[in-house]
Amino acid sequence: MKMISMVLMCFFLLACSASKVHLYTRYLSAQETEAITKNLEAHGFDVIANTLVFPDDVQQSTLLYSPFVEGENRVNVLIATLDKMGWTIANVQLLFAGNHYYTKNSIGLLLLPDGVRQSDKVTQQDLVNEYESKGCDTWIKLSLNSDASYQFLYLNKTDHQSEQLTGRWQITSYPYIELTSSNKMWRFYYEIQKSTTTDVVGKIELIELKPVDEHYTWPKCSFVYGLRV
């Protein structure tokens, strides 16, 4: 009888530890994602991170859970753990929001930092685009790639400019982005600005990278990407 009880207890603990938390990291920094993941895993959750777009109706930190989550009070444990980390879950919903559904023993965790609405902020994933120059004497294209590399393509390239053409990019402190050349000798800083314009066809969402500083070897111009909505 004692052995059966021990087996049942082990099974229960394993069932609890198998609860999957789908962590939406779209508005989180790498440091926030790492800290949340480590804490939840320490409490027996299996964390699966993603960068998916939030449902339109989610405008505050939200927890979505399946009614078949295994283990008593697992949802409460998750909420309490997040609260100790400074993340208050303002909205708890059963099963789904928008088109996001969660199956047996799954929880969706959509976190928005205080003061941030999902429509306000341009995320790192949103910045991965090809931008065209604005306000330059010559045409230039800037590619921000998903592997955090960048590349400038422009006319009339000279030899002394070639060392600046490729490198790495990162969001330093929103809304500022830093581009560092491959040889680490050059750094360029831009401010991220988001706006909406309209033409005869309809609305266009614009992401503009505006230079923060001026380099004598580099034209002081902005880079713009537009997405028709």
Image (cartoon, rainbow, N blue to C red):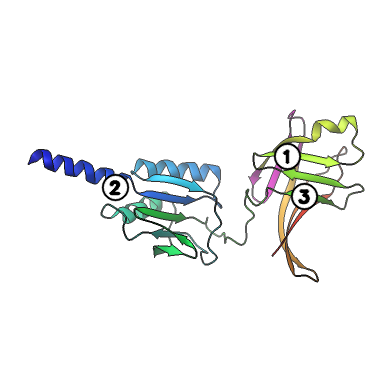
* Residue sitting nearer the eye, 197 or 7: 7
Q: Secondary structure at mark 1?
A: strand
User: Which circle's residue, 2 or 1, is located before the other in the chain?
Assistant: 2
Residue bearing mark 1: 150
Give the residue type at disc 1: Tyr
Residue 227 placement, left or right of 46: right
Which quarter of the image is occupied by the N terminus?
A: top left
User: Which circle's residue, 3 or 1, is located before the other in the chain?
Assistant: 3
The disc placed on residue 16 is 2
CA gap, disc 3 to disc 2? 47 Å
Q: Position of residue 126 (x, y in %)?
A: 65, 52
Residues shaded magenta? 171-188
User: Which circle's residue, 3 or 2, is located before the other in the chain?
Assistant: 2
Q: Position of residue 128 (x, y in %)?
A: 68, 47
Residue 177 falls within the magenta-colored stretch: yes
Q: Which residue does the image show at 88% across and 30% down from the upper left?
A: 160
Q: Main secondary structure of the magenta part?
A: strand
Q: Secondary structure at mark 3?
A: strand
Give the residue type at disc 3: Tyr
Q: Secondary structure at mark 2?
A: helix
Which corner quadrant of the image does residue 169 belong to? top right
Q: Which residue does the image show at 85% across and 45% down from the upper left?
A: 140
Residue bearing mark 3: 131
Give the residue type at disc 2: Cys
